[in-house]
Amino acid sequence: MFNLDEKREYIINAYIDIFGEEYRDQITSRLGNANIIYYLTEDNYNNYIRGLRTIKEQELMIQYYQSIGNHSLDKYSVKNYIEGTTEDEDGIVWEFYDDIENMPPIPDEIQEEINRILNEYVEELQSSKSYITDNTELLENYNKAFTQKMREVLKLNLPENFADIRDIDMINAFSKDNERTVQDSIFGQSTIEDSILNNKLKYFQKLRMIKQNVDVTTLKYSTKTAILDKLMENTAIRALVPTESQIEKIRALQFGYLTDYNYEALINREDIKDNSELLEIIQSNKDKVSAAMASNRICELIGENNKKVVLFTLLKNAYGENTHNYLHELAHIATTNEDGIVGIENTNTITNNVEAEENPGKRKYEVLNEILIDYYSEQAMQRLVENGIYLIEDQDTTYTHDQHHNTSIELRNLVVPLISLCDKEIKEALITGSQEPIRNAIGNENFERLNNLINKTYYNQYRMDIDDETFDNNKAEGLIEEAEIYNDITEYRNKKNPTTK
């Protein structure tokens, strides 16, 4: 699906264009010498394929109805189907699949043609399988051990072929966490809800309470909900639904086994075993690597002599955003200097750095650094797209709109005025790893106040222990404090340079 190494030169030039020709040597050296380790798990690969297949299905369905003169779905016909037609963060207009139910049925021969095209589309993506971490014997042993433990946890009246690793989605479908999963999805709420409903029905199908030869995924949404409601009317059937406690234990069990399996499979890959330096970096970062792979995450590793490595995968439920995720990690590498000092954090990657008082669990300048990295990596993506260069997803499935990928709009809005005031100084601080350029530009006290506000705002957004009234009051106080800080920054700059307007 992708070979990012052959396009690295384009990425280097994009960041040189953003940060400036004076930093060509640093950016070229840092990005050119970084190692990229690609990995995919079966779970991530299949999830990604399902997502892109759904996007393509939407496109083909719209084309069919337009071809017969039915333009009821024209509002969903857009150049890029992953972005949809609205500015909300759900991406695809989730009402599409509800509206499809009111359309005349698609004739069998047309549906077969759509399926043929979809299958060809999926085949084009198969090359990505070459990056899947795969060790058949190891995986088989892992599955057996996991299955045995999983059955012990569930203790339900299940058929012998149940409780396989592949049934995890069916069990997770009953978790209360699904409400948050739906809300957080960029892919469209109705699509995620439908996937959860499919897995619930598959669960009961495994229990032989739904006919085995029925493909529940092809049923109308209303039919699916009616079947589930009917089943749940029966007390005995409801008793077979895994409890939240059971689901949490299964997840913890899965995470533990995945951690061991993925790490062992990775270090036994031929391309890793044959590179002693890479192998040493991975082994010295074992906990971080294992946790990242078990959670299907991207992470950056730093070895001796500041040797940089990015462990990269396609993220779950991040259809169309993987190019930006990749560029974001490379921006971190471009802004980590030769002494291992991270951008505007002004902290060493190896040492245990000071935690922010206002934002427990985060380093003092970490959130500010992330916001800036997110901002400039989005600029890099725009430059690549403008030149017709697509790194991972193609033109139809690359999310190009400014969506504040790793930072909220509220946090971005806190920093954008700063970028407008001293973009040059910020870039210098990021590349050199020194905060002095930005401190000199806005004043030490103002810099600290703004950073503290950013940390407080971040913490307020993710706290679960406050009520709505407290949240709103904290937000209001933040807006007032923001205005005061920027007024003081303007006053400081005017005093320092009276000709500054």
Image: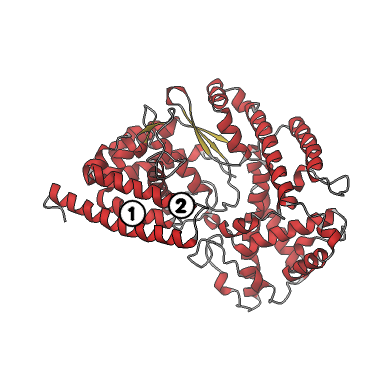
Q: Which residue is mark 2?
A: 388
Extreme residue toward the left, this view: 498
Quadrant hosting residue 436: top left
Picture coordinates of residue 157, whole percent (x, y): 87, 49
Q: Which of the two residues, 122 or 374, is positioned nearer the viewer here?
A: 374
Q: Amino acid at mark 2?
A: Gly
Picture coordinates of residue 78, whole percent (x, y): 53, 67
The scheme the figure's colours follow is: secondary structure
Instruction: Give the mark nearer the N terminus: 1 vs 2.
Output: 2
Q: Which residue is mark 1?
A: 416
State the CA–CA distance, disc 1 to disc 2: 27 Å
Say which element carries label 1: helix
Q: Is residue 128 left or right of residue 168?
A: left
Say which element carries label 2: loop
Picture coordinates of residue 205, whole percent (x, y): 83, 57
Extreme residue toward the top, this view: 276
Picture coordinates of residue 180, whole percent (x, y): 60, 57
Say if residue 387 shows up in the picture. Answer: no
Is disc 2 surrounded by few (<14), some (14 to 19) or many (20+) residues within 10 Å? few
